[in-house]
Image (cartoon, rainbow, N blue to C red):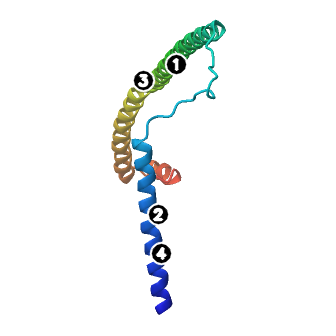
Amino acid sequence: MNRQCKNWSLRIVMAIFFILFSLRMAWATVTSPPRTVTSPPGKEIPFTLEDRDRIIRIEAKLEEIEKRFEQIEKRFEQIDKRFDDLRTFLWILAGIFTTMVAATIGFALWDRRSMIRPFEIKIKQIDDELAEDKEKLHYLLEAFRNLAKKDEKVAEILKELKLL
C-alpha cells in the first residue's frame, strides 16, 4: 500500500514538473525576438541581379500556372454543363418513349373495344331473336301436344321424336 502511494506521489510531482517546464518554454518562445538568418560575422550575403531576375521568372511561371489552372477549371465547368445537357436529353428521351408506349397501349385498348362492339350488338340481336323463336317453338309444341290428344297419328309422331 505504501509503495502505491509513493508511485502516485512521484507521478504527480513529475506531471507538475512537466507542465511547469512546458509553460516556461512557451513563455520563452513568445517573449524572445524573432530570429533571422544571418551570415557569419564579417561576411555579407549579396543579393544580386541574377537573384532578382530568377525571382521574377519564378513569379511569371507561377502566373502561367495559375492561368492554366483557370483554363482547366473552365474546361471542367464546360464538361459539367455537357453532362447536365446530356442528362436532360436522356430524361427527354425517356419521357418521349414512355408517352409512345402509353399511347400505343391506349390505342390498342380503344381499337379492341371499337372492334368488339359491333359483334356484341350482333350477338345481342341474335340472342333476342332466339328468345322470340324459343317462345314461338314452345307455343307450337304445346299446340301439337293438344292436337296429339285428339289425333293418334300426331301422337305417334311426337312419341317417335320423344316430344311427348
For residue 137, say whether it is visible. Answer: yes
Q: Residue furthest right?
A: 50
Front residue of 144/77: it is: 77
- Gap in angstroms between the C-alphas marked 1 and 3: 45 Å
| Residue that extends furthest to the bottom in the rendered view of this protein | 1
Q: Quadrant of residue 48?
A: top right
**Cβ–Cβ under 8 Å for marks 1 and 3:** no
Mark 2: amino acid: Phe
- Sequence-earlier tag: 2 or 4: 4
Going from the N terminus, do you reach mark 1 or mark 3 first? 1
Q: Secondary structure at mark 3?
A: helix
Look at the numbered disc 2 and give the secondary structure of its residue.
helix
Question: As shown in the figure, which amino acid type bears the numbered disc 1?
Answer: Asp
Q: Quadrant of the C terminus?
A: bottom left
The foreground one among 101 and 55 is 55
Answer whether residue 164 is visible to the viewer in this image. Answer: no
What residue sits 43% from the left and 74% below the top?
12
